[in-house]
Amino acid sequence: MSGRPNIRQLAEEKEESLSPLAQKSRLSRGRLEYEEPCPIRTDFQRDRDRILYSNAFRRLKHKTQVFIAPLGDHYVTRLTHTLEVSQVARTIARALNLNEDLVEAISLGHDLGHTPFGHIGEAVLDELYPRGFRHNEQSLRVVDRLERNGRGLNLTWEVRDGILNHSKTKADILAEDGEKASTLEGEVCRLADVVAYVNHDTEDAIRAGAITEGNLPLSAVTVLGMSNSARINTMVNDIIEYSWPASGASAGKTGRTISIGMSPRVLEATNTLREFLFERVYDVRSAEQESEQAREIVRLLYNYFAAHEEKLPPEYRLGNDDRQRRVVDYIAGMTDRYAIRIAEEMSLLDDRIKQQRLFLNP
């Protein structure tokens, strides 16, 4: 090879200019299985690329965010949600002088384990599977065990930690619930997830006619802004200002623990808007007919494959996991369209559901 310098090492040297509190790739806790470093990419850049080229990432384009198989082209899908989270997280990380490559990898991988039909599918699998089901744990399982025909992606500890610990409680987006990420970059992704879905779910609900701009809680929009872009701008700027000590510019000059958060005023407004979405959009949507049909499809698929393990694809019949675990892995990986098609092919849907055709024809 020519006298070209080691590009990865040059990138790692550039990371030394990041905040002293940023996670440096050369100081990663490593992978589950050792691999020789890439001569071009840092470990976190390598993880980002592995996630981006994974089958699970591609399937996100046909997975529900909130609205199941909407007729319009502009509704958010699990894929566009993921890209929005990545954009918000990278903006915050860059402003705070944290590791942008790490937040990008975590953001792109955080929802890989999400079920078809969004949180409705997640709730049904949690109800049916004796050990319970949480999409963040499934996302980690996807990157550790399921991708690459059971070999996994062998990601770094920091990316895996951020993926596992991105979920929030229903009551408070910053509640301490034992699932805090171990890096500031992971904390950034956790909040970026909220910024993304609170705003795009509001926009989708207005687009669908489920609510109007006038329905939004005045106490929240007065603080956050009257438009979608204004609310995002308010939240992102507030996170950066509140979390500024993480940049290292004022290290040792604050009396509080350095973390990624929001000011009390903006946090209260964000929680208020989020609670409104639960009351007027999420909980209402889950009670509608198409959502009940989605539940029925997931139940039928689970019961069918639990009783007919031989019908699972070969890659889901390998390993030492119990039958129910393999069934959950298969269903969780399905897109909305694929779940509907498999249920129809197995003659699991009754004529009433087929005739109503409230879902897109896959």
Image (cartoon, rainbow, N blue to C red):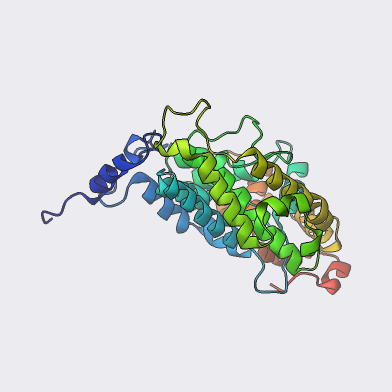
Q: Position of residue 74 (x, y in %)?
A: 65, 71
Labels in figure, total = 0
Question: Who's the residue at 63% across and 51% down the image?
Answer: 114
Let me know if residue 218 appears in the view: yes
| 1 vs 339, nearest the viewer | 1
Let me know if residue 211 appears in the view: no
| 231 vs 53, nearest the viewer | 231
| 87 vs 244, nearest the viewer | 244
Q: Is residue 160 left or right of residue 5?
A: right
Furthest-top residue in this view: 255
Q: Position of residue 179 (x, y in %)?
A: 60, 33
Question: Who's the residue at 30% across and 40% down the image?
Answer: 16
Q: Is residue 75 above or below residue 102?
A: below
Furthest-right residue in this view: 352
Question: Who's the residue at 61% across and 43% down the image?
Answer: 136
Q: Position of residue 190 (x, y in %)?
A: 57, 43
Q: Is residue 262 left or right of residue 27?
A: right
Q: Is residue 195 above or below residue 133?
A: below
| 49 vs 196, nearest the viewer | 196
Quadrant where the N terminus lies?
A: bottom left
Question: Who's the residue at 58% across and 42% down the image?
Answer: 166
Picture quadrant of residue 3:
bottom left
Q: Position of residue 196 (x, y in %)?
A: 61, 54
Quadrant where the C terminus lies?
A: bottom right
Picture quadrant of residue 81:
bottom right
